[in-house]
Amino acid sequence: MPRYSNITPFFILSLLLLFIRSQASPADSLKVKKDSTQVGFFYNDLDRYGILKLHPADTTLAGFQNYDARVKYSRFSASLGNIGQNWRNLLPYPFLRNSGFDYGIHTFEHYLYQNDSVKYYKVLKTFTQLQYVQGAKKELFFHAKFSRNIYRSFNLGFDFRVMNSPGAYTNQKTNHINFFLTGQYFTKDKRYGVIANFLLNRLINFENGGIKYDSVFEQELETNRGLYDVNLVSAQNRIRESGFYMKHYFNLSRHQKNPDDSAFLARKHIELGRISYSFEYNRQIQNYIDASHDTVFYQNIYLDSLQTYDSLTVKRIVNEVIWTNPSFRPDKKFRLLQLEAHLKQQYIEVSLHDSKKYFLQLIPSAGISFNPIPTLHLDAYGDYVFGDYNKGDMSLRVNLSQILGKPDRNAGTITLKGYYAFLKPGWFLEHYSGNNFRWDTAWAKQGLVSGGFDYNLKTMNAGITISRINKFVYLDTEATPKQLNNEFGYIYAYLNGELNLWRFRFKGQFAYQTIQGTNVLRLPAFLGNLAVYFTQVLFHNAATIQPGLNFFYNTLYAGNGYMPATRSFYLQDKKQIGNYIYMDVFLNVKIQRARIFIMYSHFNASFMKQSYYMVPNYPQQDAAFKFGVDWRFFD
């Protein structure tokens, strides 16, 4: 089987830099009068707004030490003990996913670059950001971002990330490479715009199936982690993905070049809206490889008794046409009414061994955003699916927000949330044919009705959500899919906030959840994460230091086990995990445009009981020193 060369991404990167340097005009930077260090980015949702919805680039010092994509996405998650390995979200609410075809395995997706998360940068000059992290056991992390205006409104950029971590235990290594190239162009009056990206992902995760004997770890019978017996010694999961995306938009109404003048504001005109078209192609290959075969770990053999090579390929071609009436006006601080209509066509191929399936789906959807007064806002969005497999899937989301007071002076915002979904489970949960697992069945559509309340005031956010779930599909104790015929309830309450006392900052995330009526969905009842920072400015604001502590805890529960062959989590009744606190101590430093951190993660491992599992049979990382630096350049 051919492998990606580790040199190829660096070669592409070097050629791209040379090309951009040779094509860019140095005179462009001389014309810039604004702050050239201002950097913002936007996503591919530019069809929803009359102007680009720019997000400021992250230059904050607090939380800089959290470089792991899993931790950035959700602190409340369960990992296998090494950065880059598959993981499970411990806060499944609100069980949301896009309507239409879904293969059904999402345990590695947040280590992939995906189209919806691609950032398109808006810069005034050349922008480069480099980040390097080194950890214990030869863990290495490198991240490079680049963006430059080639000519007027034409911009090219790329994002390149490499992560390699051998791990402490046998056959636990991870090696990831992610890359995307972006391009964007907007006319001077912003009436027409186009964005595009090309992405590559390559993930290699060695799978050891967990340690064989928990007692050796828990009783400290052996201190050298490399000598522990593991369940699998030659298994690997490999993900290869490539894709291309392009979106055009065109404003149907012609506006004056300077809409701020009084004549323009006084003149009545009809907004015809904005139309956009997008095209996406994506090809993902998932391989599970094991040169040997462990008949104890895997009870069934269907194809080859000597070795396992399960290769899955999922191809997608998506066309989407969108009409919106982004009613942004410089004389209005809010939008009275915004409408949007989508028509999406999806073509999907799923190939596994000798089986190949084809799907063609048509998904119309519509949304409304209504602001009758500046303090009241209503959002609603719904969709329906026509076509193969997911025919009849539908969802509806409604949010109603009320500001308690005036927009610029108030006592917070209250939001009422509602969600309804009637969706087919992922394809994997109905059809799978591998060397160790095989099933071919049909499940009823899953139903979800959810309502919630959210209160937001400055740096504090709290709320509660109550959900009713029907026909839930899960993996049982044999790691095979089953469907629950009964309904059950799920209650989720949360509190997130920051408290500043002098130079101290306390930033906390707390959640409580309970499942009523079943035990097929197992989650810790309470989760909490608290970070404490002390910030001190030095040398007349030339530098900032920020020492701090971080604490994470979740209650005891029967956490799900992990099955490498299907890259998924399943129910288990043999082990309770949790009721353990993870402590990190760190020092963050900012010197002009450079950020540096030194962290001693999980420092309490050396003096607390060795019971630190997030997934059964997979101990978490021991205490470890980590060092990282991030530097931004603007020329």
Image (cartoon, rainbow, N blue to C red):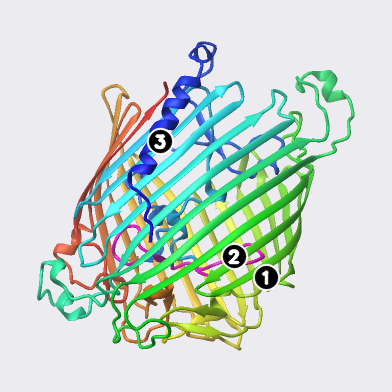
Q: Residues within 10 Å of mark 2 (few under 14, many from 20)?
A: few
**Could you say which disc has been placed on residue 13 in the image?**
3
Where residue 57 appears, x then y in whole percent? Answer: 47, 36
Q: Earlier in the sequence, mark 2 or mark 3?
A: 3
Q: In front: mark 2 or mark 3?
A: 3
Where residue 472 appears, x then y in whole percent? Answer: 58, 80
Q: Is residue 81 above or below residue 123?
A: below
Tell me, yes or no, whether the highlighted magenta stretch contains residue 632.
no
Give the SS element for disc 2: loop
Q: Amino acid at mark 1?
A: Ala
Quadrant for residue 414, please give it.
Answer: bottom right
Quadrant for residue 620, please give it.
Answer: bottom left
Region in magenta:
79-105
Quadrant position of the N terminus in the picture: bottom left
Q: Amino acid at mark 3?
A: Leu
Residue at the disc numbered 1: 421
Give the SS element for disc 1: strand
Q: Say which of 531 and 304 sits in front.
A: 304
Q: Say which of 107 and 572 sits in front.
A: 107
- Does residue 371 show up? no
Q: Would you say the residues marked 1 and 3 are in contact, meaning their CB atoms lie under 8 Å apart?
A: no
Q: Does residue 435 appear to the left or right of 250 in the view shown?
A: left
The residue lying at 58 percent from left, 43 percent from top is 43
Q: Would you say the residues marked 2 and 1 are in contact, meaning their CB atoms lie under 8 Å apart?
A: yes
**Could you say which disc has been placed on residue 317 in the image?**
none
**Could you say which disc has been placed on residue 96 in the image?**
2
Q: Residues within 10 Å of mark 3 (few under 14, many from 20)?
A: some
Q: Overall secondary structure of the magenta stretch?
A: loop
Mark 2 → mark 1, Cα distance in angstroms:
8 Å
Q: Amino acid at mark 2?
A: Leu
